[in-house]
Image (spheres, coloured by chain):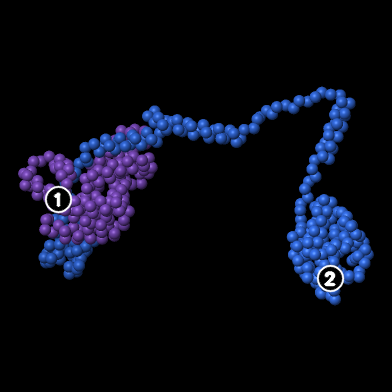
Amino acid sequence: MFYHKFRAKDISLLIDGRLEDKRALLLEEHLHSCSRCQHTLESFKKLTNAMGHLQRLNAPVGLAQNIQTKINTKKTLKNPFSRFNLIYIPMSALGVAIAVIILISNTYEPLHKPYKEVAIMSTEEHTIQSKAKAKNDYKQTETSAPPMPAITKPFIRILPISPNQDTDKTVNGVGSLSKGLRTAKLAPETNTSDNLDKTLLSSANRLITKAGGQTIAVNTESDTTIYIDIKIQYSNIQTLAASLSNIGSINNSIPITKGNSEVVTLRIELYYK
Amino acid sequence: MGTELNSATDEDAKSIKAFRAGDINAFNRLLEKYMDRIFNVCYRFLGDYEDAKDASQDVFLKVYDSLNKFRGDSSFYTWLYKITVNTCKNKLNSIEYRLFRKMGIIIKKDCQGKPNKNSLDEYIQNLPNGKPSPLTLLEYKEKELTIQRAINSLPPIQKIVVVLRDVEGFNYEEIAKITGLNTGTIKSRLFRARVRLRKKLEASL
């Protein structure tokens, strides 16, 4: 919207006295000769004049009172100790009481614990009493259940042995094999017990029998390993290995080759690392 | 407008000090002093008597709540107008208000372009004490309503700027303080508003 050299915006600014002095002089000069710009100036002047003379309305009656009432209501709600606020006080008092009770119950420790009764006795009496106490403590230790060892699974190795090998002789320098079931300690000592060995052996024997094997000899004399020599059908070895994996971790890949005979002799080593 | 208010700033400062000291009457004095002016601005911004009533009530409640936080960086009336402008701007921008306005316009159209009876009665009650002839009164009233309708049709910022400048008589710097706009923006918004109004009111001015 151009009016020759001047925009309508310049005329709007001229009305407000906000046009630069130099430009204002030029515009005023221009206005003498330009009816279009004169008309724009007149229309803007009329508009601002009408706007400036719009009726000034008075605030509605009661507005001040409404505001004051609202302020008073706000003040009452904000002030918990206001005598008008009958619900707020019991509620806040109840809250404080609950908080105090919780705090006390969590932190309370009797400051003065009840004194222990101390018997006054002679040295002799004291010695007798001490001995009796020691005896009692010892009994308690004896009768109380032994601590349960941590159950760890043994490792299992299945090795082929020669069918002609004398199973009663020393094998791998571990010790002599003997028939029958005996118990021995297994390492680590803290983790084992005789009961545990028996359980382990009986489990192993049960699984061997179930897989169609036959126990030839058992050696439990070693502190670390139980040796079980067995005879088993070649076809049943995999079944046996699968069964034994329930009681321990099989630690080798069973390098057994089929010989002339269908029955093979194996040594099962149960050991803890 | 500016000088009139500037002369009152000392008085306002005293009232604020007294209010901070716990004198509730000091707030009432400020309320009495500015209530009409704030209501009038709200009416020009919102174009509805009831809305202006609610808005001016909100303004004074906000003033009451935050008068203790008033730091005195600007004069009290600038701060008061700032709150007024923000309150009205929020109202103008709210979806509910826009919907209400749409519905209101439909109702007014049904009434052959005249405002509802209650507003009209209140409007007549608030006219100056002179006794103009019924015809003059009617013409005056019609002109007023036409101008107000034209103001209502402006976008919010243009409306705020033109009301503050042409109705309330604030200068550009004061408008900048109140609205937070820079002077360049005020100039352009004011010009656009005037062009729009001139176009709408050409026949009636």
> Would residue A45 be found to the left or right of residue A221 on screen?
left
- The C terminus of chain A appears in which quarter of the rendering? bottom right
Q: Position of residue A233 (x, y in %)?
A: 81, 69
Pick whichever, B78 or A144, lies toward us: A144
Pick whichever, A51 or A58, lies toward us: A58
Up-down relation of residue A18 to residue B27 (above or below): below
* Quadrant assignment, res B190: bottom left
Q: Residue under mark 2: which chain is it in?
A: A
Q: Secondary structure at mark 1?
A: loop
Between the C-alphas of marks 2 and 1, the distance is 114 Å
**Residue A44, label in figure:** none
Q: Position of residue A173 (x, y in %)?
A: 91, 64
Task: Tell me the mark number nearer the camera, choosing from 2 and 1.
Answer: 2
Say which residue label 1 marks: B111
- The N terminus of chain A appears in which quarter of the rendering? bottom left
The amino acid type, in three-letter code, at marker 2 is Val
Q: Position of residue A137 (x, y in %)?
A: 82, 36
As drawn, the chain in blue is: A
Q: Position of residue A169 (x, y in %)?
A: 93, 64
As drawn, the chain in purple is: B
> Would residue A61 be found to the left or right of residue B27 on screen?
left
Residue at figure coordinates x 39%, y 31% from the top left? A85
Residue at figure coordinates x 89%, y 70% from the top left? A163
Up-down relation of residue B100 to residue A144 (above or below): below
Residue at figure coordinates x 38%, y 42% from the top left? B69
Q: Residue under mark 1: which chain is it in?
A: B
